[in-house]
Image (cartoon, rainbow, N blue to C red):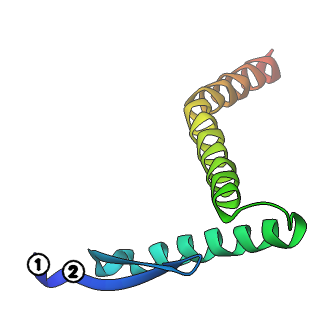
Amino acid sequence: MEDNKLSINLNIIDRFYPLRIEVKEEEKIRKAAKLINDKVMQYKQKYTDKDTQDFLAMAALQYVSKVLELENNQDKKPLVNELQEIEKELEDYLQKQ
């Protein structure tokens, strides 16, 4: 399925990274790069005495923390659904009494 590949140059903080990606992934990858660039620019404006590497590290930390939080919430989702089902069954039972 080599036909579905696309070569792009991704700009992250004025450095270009040549990538070969699935066509369907292009929008997501470009959006990810934009989010990184935007976050680094926010840090640059707020902390003028720091290095770009520091800003990249902080952006990475922020985004990975968010991913871990979302993963943790996904792990809880089946439990929450089961508890909601039990609650509904209890309510139905109590209404019949």
Residue at position x 61%, y 30% in the image: 76
* Residue at the limit of the structure toward the right, as seen here: 46
Which label was assigned to residue 5?
2
- Which one is nearer the viewer's eye here, 55 or 34? 55
Q: Secondary structure at mark 2?
A: strand
Q: Give the number of marks.
A: 2
Q: Which mark is residue 14?
A: none
Would you say 14 lies left or right of 7 here? Answer: right
Residue 94 placed where, x, y %?
80, 18
Give the residue at mark 1.
2
Alpha-carbon neighbours of circle 2 within 10 Å: few (<14), some, or many (≥20)?
A: some
The x and y percentages for residue 43 are 80, 65
Quarter-of-image position of residue 5? bottom left
Quadrant of the image occupied by residue 91: top right
- Quadrant showing the N terminus: bottom left
Instruction: Name the kind of residue labelled 1 in the image.
Output: Glu
Mark 1: give few (<14), some (14-19) or many (20+) Cα within 10 Å.
few
The x and y percentages for residue 7 are 27, 84
| SS type, badge 1 | helix
Q: Amino acid at mark 2?
A: Lys
Is residue 75 rendered to the left or right of residue 19? right
Note whether 73 is above or below 44 in the view shown.
above
Tell me: residue 32, above or below residue 6: above
Q: Nearer the viewer, residue 33 or 69?
A: 33
Q: Are marks 1 and 2 in contact (CB under 8 Å)?
A: yes
**Disc 1/disc 2 C-alpha distance (Å):** 6 Å
Asked if 68 appears above or below 76 in the picture, the reply is below
Q: Quadrant of residue 74?
A: top right
Task: State the image coordinates of residue 16 (x, y, percent, origin top left).
Answer: 44, 80
